[in-house]
Image: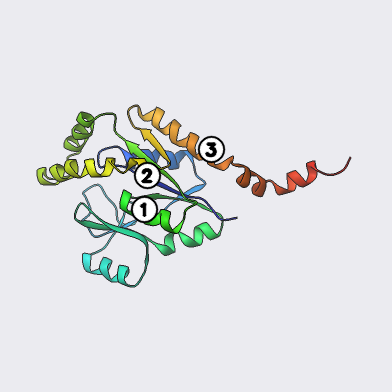
Amino acid sequence: MSGTLYIIAAPSGAGKTSLVRALLEREPDISLSISYTSRLARSNEVDGQHYHFVSREVFERMAQAGAFFEYANVHGDYKGTARAAVEPLLAAGRDVLLEIDWQGAQQVRAQRPDSLSIFILPPSRNELERRLRTRASDSAEQIARRIADSRIEIARAEEFDYIVINDDFATAIGDLRAIFAARRLRREAQMGRHASLLDDLLKPA
């Protein structure tokens, strides 16, 4: 039985990365795919842990070679998911989580209509801008671009299966875990996972 592909997307400043990190601590059966990016690493980022950091030229060569499951230009830099990081795990029955943008989500849904997508929203415009300005990792120009781009990104929320509001962090984590639990309890998943139990229960008396 193939694993489930989960997508989580959000505008910058919505708290997606913190939510994903906390979610994975509570859901050890899910593998996070580490994306490739052509942007420079921030001071608190580690290559291979937060992203695979490569030059723009290397990224473009990989894209031309068909190495990416999905990729897009995000805030002026490339980001993408390598096929080798996703397809073998899904084929082996492992659930995989992609932390990507709405453009990548569109590409993934086209290839995997059975994927499940979640969009994270901030509680307000003011809070989104506050989080971006207090993050202290981007220049004023980058922050202004992210704020402008957020309107385009948020307009795509209606394309996703679920929407989670990240106002109270603990509540948002609980909402995400509820989505994952519901997915695992679908009839198709349960019947495949517990085939031997069903056989036993259906034995003649």
The location of residue 84, given as percent across then percent down, is: 43, 64
Regarding residue 198, the answer to whether it shows in the image is yes
Q: Alpha-carbon neighbours of circle 1 within 10 Å: few (<14), some, or many (≥20)?
A: some
Q: Secondary structure under badge 3?
A: helix
Q: CA distance from mark 3 to mark 1?
A: 24 Å
Q: Which residue is mark 2?
A: 159
Q: Which mark is in front, 3 or 2?
A: 2
Q: Is residue 60 left or right of residue 142?
A: right
Judging depth in this view, the residue of 153 and 74 nearest the camera is 153
Identified at 50% across, 58% down, the residue is 89
What is the distance, in whole Å, between disc 2 and disc 1 at their CAs?
9 Å
Q: Are marks 2 and 1 in contact (CB under 8 Å)?
A: yes
Left or right, residue 29 beside residue 81: right
Q: Which mark is residue 181?
A: 3
SS type, badge 2: helix
**Badge count:** 3
Mark earlier in primary sequence (2, 1):
1
Residue 159, quarter of picture: top left
User: Which of pointers 3 and 1 lies earlier in the amino acid sequence?
Assistant: 1
Mark 2: which amino acid?
Answer: Glu
Work out how far the residue at label 3 is from the one at label 2, CA to CA, in angstroms: 21 Å
Label 3 neighbourhood size at 10 Å, few (<14), some (14-19), many (20+)? few
Image spot of residue 192 (x, y percent): 65, 49
Residue at label 1? 106
For the N terminus, give its image quadrant.
bottom right
Q: Nearer the viewer, residue 49 or 37?
A: 37
Looking at numbered disc 3 in the image, what kind of residue is underneath it?
Ala
